[in-house]
Image (cartoon, rainbow, N blue to C red):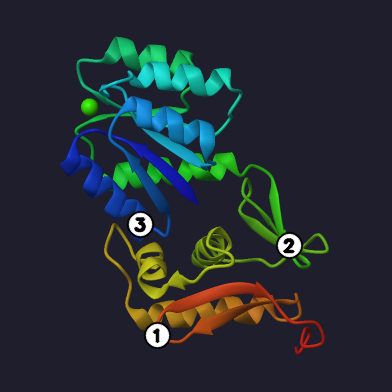
Amino acid sequence: MRILLAEDDPTLQRGLAQALHETGHVTIAACDGAAADLLLSTESFDLLVLDLGLPKMDGLVVLERLRRRRQSLPVLILSARDQTHDRVLGLDRGADDYLTKPFELSEFEARVRALLRRGQAGTVRIGTLAWSWESREATVDDVTLGLTRHEANLLEALIQTAGRTATKATLAQLLGESGIAAEDNLVEVYVSRLRRKLTGTGVEIRTVRGLGYRLQEMASGSAGNG
Ligand code: CA
């Protein structure tokens, strides 16, 4: 996913960019409103993280111009505690969610996840496999694969990074509890369980040695080995 991060505080910008990078997203940072506005009108993004108090062009103006161009990408507002009025204005002008500074990184990550999921509403298909972002259910020919919560989390992460490699660290973070990453071998256990359930679907989880895993359609002729 490509995320535009419009934040002028260098420390916060660095911290958020790092967190987004670690969860497998490509993050482009803009330090002022005018730069954000230019990027938004020339490039495509899946999410905008927008600080309201930006130099050169106010965050609210950036938002207004974005929606006037009929760009529908989700917007997460970051605002200081004394900007309640602006926050309400922001939601009125088409922002999807907001966070009040200071906030916990885990909270930020959860909001980003939710907005990205909402942005991809509907179903994604890889070969015969269909994944619903809404119900978080994987089906083949309308028959559910019956994934457990961890398996569904894993598959979702692999679908989100489809075409690229999902790192073991990212997946471990996902399977861990309350922010503590799971052991590497737990990732392996769940990957092998998920692989079993994907047998015959024509979709496979390829191991990228030393890096992680990649979800892909099998080359024709090699499907259905189970
Ligand atoms: Ca600011």
Of labels 3 and 2, earlier in sequence is: 3
Determine crowd level at label 1: few under 14, some 14-19, many 20+ residues with C-alpha closer than 10 A: few
Determine crowd level at label 2: few under 14, some 14-19, many 20+ residues with C-alpha closer than 10 A: some
Mark in front: 3 vs 2: 3
Determine crowd level at label 3: few under 14, some 14-19, many 20+ residues with C-alpha closer than 10 A: few
Q: Position of residue 81 (x, y in %)?
A: 20, 21
| Position of the C terminus by quadrant | bottom right
Name the residue: 56% across, 62% down: 152
Name the residue: 34% across, 60% down: 22
Q: Amino acid at mark 3?
A: His
Numbered disc 2: secondary structure: strand
CA distance separating discs 3 and 1: 19 Å
Of labels 3 and 1, earlier in sequence is: 3
Of labels 2 and 1, earlier in sequence is: 2
According to the picture, the residue beneath numbered tag 1 turns out to be 210
The image quadrant where one finds ligand 1 is top left
Depicted 185 relative to depicted 101: above or below:
below
According to the picture, the residue beneath numbered tag 2 turns out to be 139
Q: Is residue 192 visible?
A: no
Q: Is residue 141 visible?
A: yes
According to the picture, the residue beneath numbered tag 3 turns out to be 21
Say which quarter of the image contains residue 25. bottom left
